[in-house]
Amino acid sequence: MKIAILGAGKLGLRLVEALLDGDYDITLVDSDDEKLNRIAQQYDVMTVTGDAKTVELLREIDVANVDFLFSATTSDDTNILAASFAKILGCKYVAARVRDPEHMNQLEFIREHYNIDMLVNPDLLITGEIYRYLIEKYTLSNSIYTFDRIALIEFEASKLPNIVGKSLIEFRSVMPEFLVIGLSRNGKMLVPHGPDLIEQNDLVYLIGEKQEVFRLAKKVHSKSHHSDARKVMIIGGGKTGYYLARRLSEYGSHVKIVEQDRRRCHYLTNKLRNVMVLNGDGANIALLEEEDLDSMDAFVTCTGYDEENLLLALTAKNHGVEDVISKVSHESYKDLISKLGIDIVLNPLDISASAILRAIRGSKRVLSSVLLQGQAEIMEIYASDRMTMINIPLKDLDLPNYVIIAAIRRGLETIIPDGNTVIKDGDRVIIVCLVSNIGYVEKLFRPAMRLNIRR
């Protein structure tokens, strides 16, 4: 499959890294020749220097034979034109990153008028995840997600005291009809394995047959769990802060935005209704306290600085705010995050890359997928005899610790696997993987893929 990525910025490179393990012929375009030379030395991709929106360059990369093109330059207008020109020149599927709020009310018009298959807005995607957490509390509708006869349930570990303190191995002896496929702990999503313990405050994700899951739901879900996020403070009035404030105010929350740039404050004041915009330094704790930080139901940090986002989120947590969410783009902080006690930490690059990968894979290979708290993806894939995982016991596959085979559908049979289970041709396999490592799943689509197998 031939893929072209226009723009070697953070999102473009994140997508390249995710695709490297798959069966893809990747071309990366950027105007910075020096940057492309560094990338070419690090990754096995073809690099082309030039202006992404010119027909000449698109013809140079043979766009007529490209299966998927994603334009992610720093300019919305360039992305729209490049994707549109690529479609006219014969590219099968085109996508463009569009971030400007001025375009948000005309996305459908842009998509149809310029014949673009997919528009990607990272700020809107992360806003959606934050909103679902704050307002619906659960990332899953009614805390349950179904895959035909299989279902996934989400609940607090404290609702089942008999599983708290038990390892995953011990859990299977207590509840053999289920498999734990995820634990959310202190703002970090974990894909757990045998020796990992379930802790009191964990949010637990179980998978099992639909009837068994709905029986369990009666025990662990006393009622619909909706948020009491009546008062929300947002630090950072950039695109994410703007989209989130607009959506929360439409829901009926009382929203305060703290933004340091005076001109940006004027913009927000003119564009947002029923939102209090404060011109000030979000790192000024005295200011936050003066604005009733202690009485907030939720606190969201989405400035352009990861360090500031994390420190302010920790401050809010120490002030007793119930729901604290932070936007963090750098992977280097992921080990620190679980120690801070922040409720949710989201990476817009991971969320965006996941959405684009779903479009690249298509519905023939990935039958369905859903994000868990924006940090892990659960997907149902169709297993074919081209995969080297076929007919090999799962215990003999050296799968990384961020991947778990959660369930298998074989005809009318539902299988909750153990180490002796094998995947067969035609199975529908449910896989869980951390979004930050989602590129590994691309190996599943390689012809005659090679995995490390213990013999």
Image (cartoon, grey):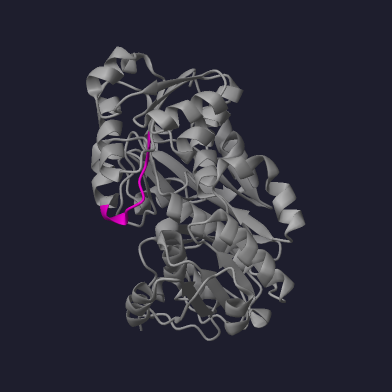
Residue pictured at 48% horizontal, 75% vertical? 28
Q: Is residue 329 located in the magenta-colored stretch of the structure?
A: yes
Residue 166 in the image: state x and y as whole percent: 32, 44
The answer to whether residue 364 is seen in the rendering is no
Name the foreground residue: 337 vs 285: 285
User: x, y (%) of residue 51?
Assistant: 52, 71
Give the answer, above or below, for where 202 lies relative to 439: above
The tally of labels here is: 0
As rendered, which of 166 and 130 lies closer to the eye?
A: 130
72 up-or-down from 394: above or below: above
- Residue 81 shown left or right of residue 5 in the figure: right
Q: Residue 213 location in percent, x, y?
A: 58, 42
Residue at 28% in and 32% down: 312
Q: Is residue 13 above or below residue 42?
A: above
The single residue placed furthest to the right in the displayed view is 113
Q: In which quarter of the image is the N terminus?
A: bottom right
Work out which quarter of the rendered image holds the C terminus and state it.
Answer: bottom left
Question: Who's the residue at 36% across and 32% down the image?
Answer: 261
Q: In this view of the protein, which residue sits in the foreground, 416 or 337?
A: 337
Quadrant position of residue 346: top left
Q: Toward which corner of the image does residue 32 lie, by quadrant? A: bottom left
Name the one closer to the observer, 125 or 219.
Answer: 125
What percent of the width, then of the height, locates residue 40?
37, 80
Residue 380 in view in this figure: yes
Chain part drawn in magenta:
325-332
- Check if residue 54 falls in the magenta segment: no
| Left or right relative to 106: residue 450 | left
